[in-house]
Image (spheres, rainbow, N blue to C red):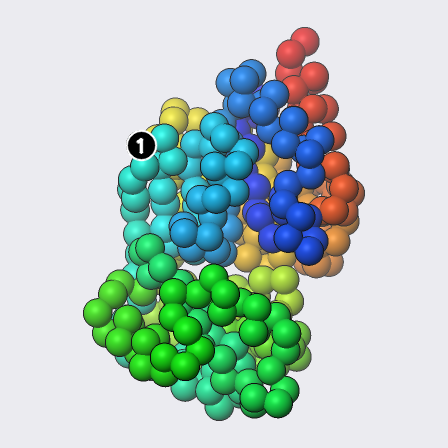
Amino acid sequence: MKIKAFAFDMDGTLLRSNNLGVHPETMEALKEASEAGYELILATGRPVCMTAPTAEEIGNVSYLVSNNGGSLYDVKKDENISESFLTFELFEKVIALAKETKSFFAMSTTNKIYRENFFDEVNTPEWVKTSFNEASNKPDEKDCVYEAARTEKITQLTIKNSKEIVAAQKEALKDELSSEASMHIANEVYLDINPNNVSKLTGITKVVNRMGIDISEVMVFGDSGNDLQMIKGAGYGVAMENATEEAKAAAKEVIGHHDTNAIGMKIKEVLKAQSK
């Protein structure tokens, strides 16, 4: 098996903690891989608008597999090539649960992300307050999310809370949403809800096929529940040291922590082995 493309989850994998971005030595390795003819893909639960800046920083990224595979974006042509959508009725069910469980709620559309905080004001975590700095709506614009849901196409819904509450939310929605959508827990505290029949694996498969590459020729890196399918289904699945036990068990190899240069070292190892 010859690797021809690398696909990376972002949070908890390619990006370091505390908004430090990609490790400098990993950035070097990505540049080397691109110059050697390897294709680079970002595969994330983030919407396109929150994925593009990292792609721009890296340079030479071919495709974005965003919203857990629900949105596919050709970076070089600057165009969406595929999108799948959720219904307004499903939005109503999910936001009602977020409100009932006093959770943080986010809705992704083609070009924006809208957020709503249902935490009690006195118990609102600092990360919730900070997140509104990048939101398309402000905390005091109560109708903004609902209006956007009625008028825009919804690509993903996300609830964030504690590990225990998110697991309970997934269980509560399981039967009701099974025919309409798929659910993935990411980084233990996010519940991502996407259209049925899309995943990072289906998204990566579609974009590499456009480049004449088979999924068996792709090395993927991930750490969480929404990475499981791609770790299992790609040619070579790699999990991070900080990955969930399930992701580690699914991977062909476990490398170092996402705060280190582990990904860069693995890329260089592949480049060296395949240059012989």
Q: Residue at coordinates 26% horizontally, 76% vertically from top-left?
A: 147
The quadrant the N terminus occupies is top right
Q: Position of residue 117 (x, y in %)?
A: 49, 80
In terms of depth relative to the viewer, which is nearer, 80 or 192? 80
* Relative to 138, residue 266 above or below: above
**Can residue 207 be seen at all in this image of the molecule?**
yes
Q: Position of residue 64 (x, y in %)?
A: 43, 42
Task: State left or right for residue 207 relative to residue 56.
Answer: left
Q: In x, y percent, where is residue 135?
A: 44, 65
Image vertical order of residue 153 relative to residue 200, above or below: below
Instruction: Name which residue lies at 67% across and 48% down.
Output: 20
Left or right: 134 in relation to 269? left
Of 115 and 73, the residue lying toward us:
115
> Is the residue marked by circle 1 packed among few (<14), some (14-19), or many (20+) residues within 10 Å?
few
Query: On the picture, is 48 further left or further right than 26?
Result: left
Q: Amino acid at mark 1?
A: Lys
Vertical side of 3 occupied by 142: above or below: below
Q: Provide the residue designation for mark 1.
A: 77
